[in-house]
Amino acid sequence: MLTRREFIGYGVSTLFLLSLNEKLFASDTPDVFPLGIASGDPTQNSIVLWTKLNPDVIKKGAEKLNLHISNDPEFKSYQTLPIDLKFLNPKTNTLKITISDLKPGTHYYYRFEYRGISSLVGKFRTLPNGKVDNEKIIFVTCQNYPDGYYPAYRHIAQEEALMVVHLGDQIYEKRYGNPRVPGRDIQFPSGKDIANTLEDYIYLYNTYLSDKDYQLARATTPFVYIWDDHEYGNDYSFDYSKGLYVLPTHPDWIKNNPKLVMELRKYAIYAWNAFTPADAKINFSDSNPLKWIKIYRDFKIGDLAHLICTDERSYRDPQPCDKRFGSPGCEDQYKTSMLGKEQKEWFFEKLKEKGQRWKVWANEVQFVEGKINNLFGSLDAWSGYLGEKQEIVDFLDQNKLYNTVILTGDRHATLIAEVRKDNKNPDSIVAVEYMTPAISSVNASEIPFYKRNFNLENVEEFTKLELEQNPWIRHINNKNWGYGVLELTKDYADCKIWSVDKYNPNSDKQLDCHYRYLDGKRELKKIS
């Protein structure tokens, strides 16, 4: 997986860790810990750790599962925490445990051990306190398993970042056609082409997490997960008048069965929570389905940055107007909410909190407008929620929160844009939007939606018109896959988008673009 050349330039601990985990992949480790390990939701003094035990190796009366934690990658000294196997999730054999009383801004290494067999070795750093000069945050999105390999994660494992922010679509709830690369087919336990049982959702996570590059990234860097629609169902929303979720693209036998729709919601939440190292609170006993899980949360990185993560699916009104793509729009765009009342109030309160130079918003869908020939690109994105979008823009402007960086996924494209209070005024910038391409999901070069919705001949024409007709958008790449890197300092918020070839599991990475948003200047500059 990792070549000798790829090790050059990385720290000794990272080099050692990657080399060690390569050896462990070839040992008995995958037989006992088939999905590796993961850490997530770091704070100044805690971390969530995760693993899965192979149920075939668990023996009654066997020794406890041991967790080793050390400040040394070679574990010359370490602390051991015995874990009773009763804490394993009985339906998934996964373990999620929060470790507290850690020191701020400190590197830790960890591994699980069962019956003498060690897991991969993981690494994380707790969030720093006080003065922080610079940090690196990776952001990713959209990784349909049958659509391609995950070489992006192999490169992410070498980035030595503080965290990886996953913006959603970690799994896909159905088979979207035949696999595009060998060995990546999906066969649901139910025999259907779409997840409709808890076992189906669990199967998806077991399958997606079997990817070794994904396991390597989850071992080397803490993840902060939010979700988009495919963790449950494509384009889903909530019908407040009926108190039900809406699955508009599901087959009739599902979407016309309210009981099954709500059961699937519980299945999707249960599986996501069981396989994701996130500190989410679940309450299925609440009669209000909006209270079943809460994933919006925030993280403070010393005096440098405040990461605010929102949930733009669970509380949103149904998409307005006549169709999702290529719509001329309608008045209902100004009446819809994506965040919901309670979350929006929380979001604005978090934006107002002081003490950090940068506000970083983990946002699922495209924020800036992208019209072509007076047709909106997607009303599933913020263009379908224009009233609430304007509220957010006005709030940023009124509170002079101009050091706001929006990290976006969903579209399967690179997009770099100025967020303006008035799109006609280039001096009215209130924030910047950095969008990462998909890890592997199909992009506009593979599915010709521009023909169906905009009557255009090719993706090049689609890209050209969007840039020409939306001057606040500075860069678009509709033909790549990869990941984003946000580098924050006291002077700027840099974004580099790295492209990979999902059809080549050993793909190198290539720089797609590099932009810089200057502290206090409300100015976005192209670096390369």
Image (tube, rainbow, N blue to C red):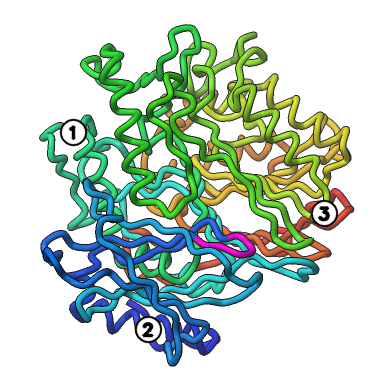
Label 3, residues with CA under 10 Å away: few <14, some 14-19, many ≥20:
some
Distance between mark 3 and mark 2 Cα atoms: 42 Å
Which residue is rendered at x = 44% and y = 41% of the image? 444
Q: Position of residue 84 (x, y in %)?
A: 28, 63
The residue at which mark 2 appears reads as 3
Camera-near label (3 vs 2) is: 3
Tell whether label 2 touches label 3 (CB within 8 Å). Answer: no
Question: In the image, residue 346 lies at what x, y percent?
Answer: 68, 33
Would residue 394 appear left or right of 409 to someone viewing this image?
right
Residue drawn at (20%, 43%) of the image: 178
The part of the image, by quadrant, that contains residue 394 is top right
Q: Are marks 3 and 1 in contact (CB under 8 Å)?
A: no
What residue is at 36 percent from the left and 59 percent from the top? 502
Nearest the viewer among 345 and 8 is 345
Label annotation for residue 40: none
Quadrant in which the C terminus is drawn: bottom right
Looking at the picture, how far across and down is residue 433, in whole percent? 68, 45
Instruction: Give the Cα separation between the discs numbered 2 and 1.
Output: 38 Å
Residue located beneath label 1 in the image: 193
Report the residue marked by disc 3: 355
Please report contact status of discs 2 and 1: CB closer than 8 Å, yes or no: no
Residue sitting at 12 percent across and 66 percent down? 59
Element class at badge 3? loop
Q: Earlier in the sequence, mark 2 or mark 1?
A: 2
Q: Decide if residue 371 is in sight here.
A: no
Residue 239, horizontal then vertical, whole percent: 46, 13
